[in-house]
Amino acid sequence: MVDTLNVDGLVAVGVPLALAIRLTSVVVTLMLARHARACRWVALGASTAASMMTAGVAVRVIESGRAIEGTLFRQAASETVLGYSVTPLSAWFLMVLGLIAVPVALYSAGYFAHAVARPRTAAVGAAVNAMLGGIEVVFVADGVIAFLCGWEVMTLGTAALVATEHQSRQSRRAAYLFLAMSHVGTGCLMAGFMILASAAGSLSFPAILSGHVVSGPVRHGVFALFFIGFGVKAGLIPFHVWLPEAHPAAPSSVSAFMSAVLITAGIYGLFRVCAFGLGTPDVNWALVFMSVGTLSAILGVLYALTQTDIKRLLAYSTIENSGIISLGLGTAMMALADGRSTLATVAATASLMHVLNHAIFKGLLFLGAGSVGMATGTRHIEQFGGLLRPMPWTGLCFLVGALAISGLPLLNGFPSEWLTFQALLLGFSSTPGMIRLTFPLAAALLALTSALAAACFVRAFGISFLALPRSRAASEAHESPVFMLVPLGFLATLCVVLGLFPGGVLRALEGITASLPGLQPPAAMVWDGLGMSSTLTSFDHVVPAMFGLAVLSGLIVSTALTARRGVAVRQAPTWGCGGELTPRSEYTATAFSKPLLMIFGAVYRPTRQVDALAEVSPYFVDEVRYRTEIEPTFERYFYGPLVRGVMQMARGMKVLQAGSLHAYLAYVLVLAVILLMWLGGTT
Amino acid sequence: MMSMQDALLAAGAALLHAGGLLAVAPLLKTVIKKMKARLQNRQGPPLLQGYYDLAKLLRKEPLRSEVASWVYVAGPRVYFAAAVAATTLVPVVFAAAPLEAAGGILLLVGTLALGRFALATAALDTGSPFGGMGASRDMTIAALAEPALMLGLFASALAAGSMNLGVLVRTLVQEGVTLHPADILAFAGLFMIVIAETGRIPVDNPATHLELTMIHEAMVLEYAGPDLALVEWASAVKELLYLTLLVDLFMPVGIATSAAPQAVLVAIVAWVGKVFVLAVAVTVVESTNAKLRLFRVPELVSISLGLAFLALAIRFL
């Protein structure tokens, strides 16, 4: 009895306490700036404690299905009260954050010591806590002010992290691009919230997101504003341009946060506001979601396929997964627009499940990439090779992540993609009219996406970890310290466990979907405790654990078939086509993706340049230089003209803002006169 | 939850089922080879050649590259395990699959993708350029074939109202085979994909070891002895599985709905006959076509994708 009371007491103050811990740690870290080691421990220890606390609150909310509310900040004089409310939906995202933040913090304790310059440790540690605190406020805010404050702290914290290596021009550019894009997004959000708030006469979320605040064309306009605002953070194409620049620029464990957690802030907004906060979604909104989702998924993976920087590759793959999440949400909205709550629940569940699964495997992969980067000093895949020998555990964990992200059965990428397919197929069979053909089209493109993802990660793992080392750095690499391996192992285990027992995740999601307006979780979705079903077991169901046993028996049979007692395996050199086998004769990552580059040439629009350098005669070539590049379509044709337009406008406005104090005083005078005249006219 | 007895029964059925397909699969490869040889006025191998080859390979000394890691060893084993496990999801003689409670079409396609992932990754492990080339091409073709395969399967599954192969076949048997025009289109589309997925001409040539044209063979070029036996055997099972899938989806006539010996006998004969007819079709396609350039394969696959989409459209609009 006493125990439960204590736990309840802790849960009641968990969120403000966690935020207080983060705030304190930011201050303490900055004060300790001279002692890098102390900074690391304070910042990461505080982050772990705070994440565990919020995750605990989240788990309690998910268990009980009841929201926990409270006050974050109160000022009596101005009667400002900023409240928080951990709704089941917030709890899901908070739990995902906690689940990733704890292992990543542990990993960072080892990683920051090597990868972050000592004088910058304090700033990085403080920024990590600021960013995570900001994201937590975003998830729990129950009003516009707290939400936007959290949003901005999150953005600024992230920007600081992206600019960690600010001596490099590329990092500065990435941070600037991130800030510019984020603020375009924030501007849209502010405009949207202002419209809603003025219509509702309140700033609290329950009032303005009740669904009947605005109607008609205004509602569509507000939807568009929010879609852009949250879409930028979620990394959806065409608002994605910041993402492949910003993710690689930050230290790898921070990239893991950004990919696994930061983009979910955008997804959370899309859920909370666009899908469930503006009343019954319009069919066209759903179509926008589905097409943007599909486009992001397919283009994201296509771009990921051709990257040779491992972190850029993972960043593009984040865009792909964000697309898959949006596709699920779009399907849910389509179903809601038609008033089919069961289907909407299946689709929303798929989408929320993929949020969790993506966070786990992408966190794992970014941490793996960080370890590899630390061991070799480069991020270039073509300079890795043979890393499985010096780094067996990192390699194994990366392989698990690669299998999971390719959506292969027995790992956690499969259940959420499976459920997305279910939603699309059920959508097809229950929607009347031509519009139903969008579902199989999206399903076919989703199938293409996951097959391309498999190709992408065969390449990423195979070229990096297998065969001969391709550079000196790779041959001198060594395994990371144990406490960087433990988080990897933890996340890899989660990939396997959630892949084998998806029923548990579904059960947790039942209460969350039940709390969203218009959704009704069907009882038949959790099938047999272990597996999952698409509302109708006769339509489709899957029990991965059971199938895992079948695969395991297959493995045993194959091992038994080939087991030869007393015969030793003979090792022989690989045939090098008549010459000596060197790393130079290995297939490269560029070559691996070349067929797809050519087949999807219309998307990539590749340019290639081959120069043969010869001194004596053109028939005796000394050196061949090969350069290939894919066209950055969105940057060139969408953002290029936009930026040029903005710059031109700015130059035009320079006439007004010439730096002359007299001119400015004159503007003030003119404005005052005009306002007085106008006010005089109205009264 | 399943009772212990049910679980044991299902496991027993799965073992028998997978064992049966494993036993028959090498025969299919040889039959196709033999028919191809006859079309070219050659004698062709004896019918049991597939078994002789496997026995010979399994008896050989295991030989591996000194560059390779455990991934190279795991590749063929996972490939084999995936193919064997996949068989338990597909009905063959009875109108039920032994492990249909574990999943349906999506799990089947995913499992085959798992095997392919394992083998393609392992191919990169020896440092030989052929492995990389084969892996790259195999993954490319698989990626292109995947949407057409899924859409083709969806077209037939949605008509029966189930993605579970056991339920699907039972529905089809109950309603009788109608040969709706949509079925014909979906069949044509899927047949092309089966050719692509099993590495047959015009997509890949299983008989060639010419470095510029091979795909699957390049991927497994470095394998020898028992490891190669697993790859060959699993490929044969995969091919048999795909042909059985076509039979199940479009012509499940004669499949046993009860355990009466007579029904089972009829079902076995019917299955053998139907798979043989498909094998003849594969042989004819292989003997009368030239291999396509790799960059012409997308055209073939898009035709198949178009057919599947049309099948969906005419059945449901």
Image: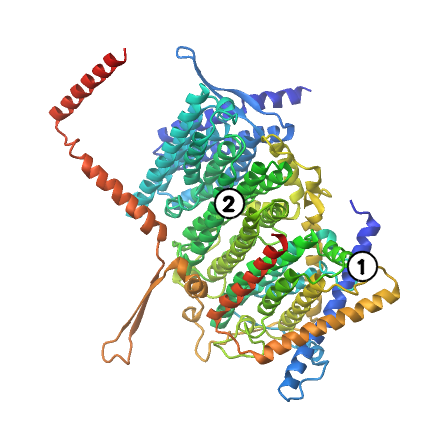
Residue A255 located left or right of residue A89: left
Q: Report the amino acid beneath label 2.
A: Met
Q: Nearer the viewer, residue B87 or B159?
A: B159
Q: Report the amino acid beneath label 1.
A: Gly
Residue B80 located left or right of residue A320: right
Seen in the picture, residue A572 relative to A337 is either above or below; the reply is: below
Please give the residue where the numbered disc 2 appears in the rendered image: A290
Numbered marks: total: 2
The residue lying at 39 percent from left, 37 percent from top is A158
Residue B92 picture quarter: bottom right
Q: CA distance from mark 1 to mark 2?
A: 44 Å
State whether residue A109 appears in this view: no
Q: Which chain contains the residue that carries disc 1?
A: B
Residue A483 is situated, as x and y percent measured from the top left of the image, at: 51, 44
Q: Secondary structure at mark 2?
A: helix
Q: Secondary structure at mark 1?
A: helix
Q: Nearer the viewer, residue B196 or B313?
A: B313
The residue lying at 14 percent from left, 30 percent from top is A659
Residue B69 is situated, as x and y percent measured from the top left of the image, at: 55, 64
Residue A75 picture quarter: top left
Q: Which chain contains the residue that carries disc 2?
A: A
Please give the residue where the numbered disc 1 appears in the rendered image: B12
How many C-alpha atoms fall within 10 Å of the one at disc 1: few (<14), some, or many (≥20)? Answer: few
Residue A108 is situated, as x and y percent measured from the top left of the image, at: 45, 41
Seen in the picture, residue A673 relative to A224 is either above or below; the reply is: above
Instruction: Give the quadrant of the N terminus of chain B.
Output: top right
State whether residue A379 appears in this view: yes
Q: Nearer the viewer, residue B18 or A639?
A: A639
Mark whose residue sits in front, 1 or 2: 2
Residue B138 is situated, as x and y percent measured from the top left of the image, at: 53, 67
